[in-house]
Every structure is written in C-alpha cells, then in structure tokens.
Amino acid sequence: MVRPALRREVVAVLLGSYRISERRACSATGFHRSAQRYRSRRDPQVELRMRLRDLAAVRVRYGYRRLHVLLRREG
C-alpha cells in the first residue's frame, strides 16, 4: 500500500465497515489526514501529456527543453 489512491480506498473501507472516524482510520493506517482529503486541482490536458510521452519515448536523449520546443512547433 504505497500509492495514496490505494490508501484512500483502505481508509474508505475502514470507515464503511467498522464505522470509525476518519481520524482513527488514518491513524490506524499511518496515512495523513491532509493527504486523505487532498483533491488535485490540476487541469488534466491528457492529449498534451500523451504527446509528450510519445516524443520522449522516440527521442530518449532529448531533455524537457528540447521536447518543449518540439511541442511548440507542433502547436
């Protein structure tokens, strides 16, 4: 159980099945309550991320600056 998403699921199971508080469930799993309540506000931009991964896979030796230039050329 390393990923925060998986830990959130474990805390949710504890909350539902044992009817304990969020504070106690987080304490039992060693998960911080601030991480439990965290919701990402980032804009997904899925297409841009996928294109960046494709370019990085093809041009392995390019750094982020060169990949950024390639993406800007594509528009």
Image (tube, helix red, strand yellow):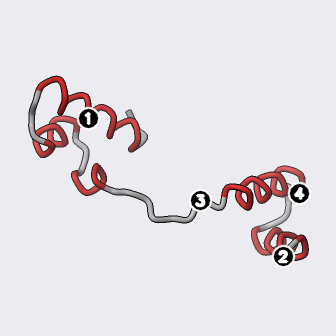
Comparing labels 3 and 4, the label whose residue is closer to the camera: 3
Under mark 2, the amino acid is Arg
Picture layout, residue 7 above or below residue 68: above
Q: Tell me the quarter of the picture where residue 7 sits.
A: top left
Q: Residues within 10 Å of mark 2 (few under 14, many from 20)?
A: few
- According to the picture, the residue beneath numbered tag 3 turns out to be 44
Residue contact between numbered discs 4 and 1, judged by CB atoms under 8 Å: no
Query: Marks 2/1: CA distance?
Result: 42 Å
Q: Residue at point 79% right, 73% down?
A: 68
Q: For residue 72, which numbered disc appears in the image?
A: 2
Secondary structure of the residue carrying tag 1 is: helix
Query: Marks 2/4: CA distance?
Result: 16 Å
Q: Is residue 16 left or right of residue 8?
A: left
Query: Marks 3/4: CA distance?
Result: 23 Å
- According to the picture, the residue beneath numbered tag 1 turns out to be 12
Position of residue 55 measured from the top left corner of the image (x, y, whole percent): 85, 57
Picture layout, residue 42 above or below residue 29: below
Comparing labels 4 and 1, the label whose residue is closer to the camera: 1
- According to the picture, the residue beneath numbered tag 4 turns out to be 59
Under mark 3, the amino acid is Pro
Under mark 1, the amino acid is Ala
Position of residue 61 measured from the top left corner of the image (x, y, whole percent): 85, 60
Q: Is residue 20 left or right of residue 31?
A: left
* Sooner in the amino-acid sequence: mark 4 or mark 1: 1
Residue contact between numbered discs 2 and 1, judged by CB atoms under 8 Å: no
Q: Residues within 10 Å of mark 4 (few under 14, many from 20)?
A: few
Q: Residue at point 22% right, 41% down?
A: 30
Quadrant placement of the N terminus: top left
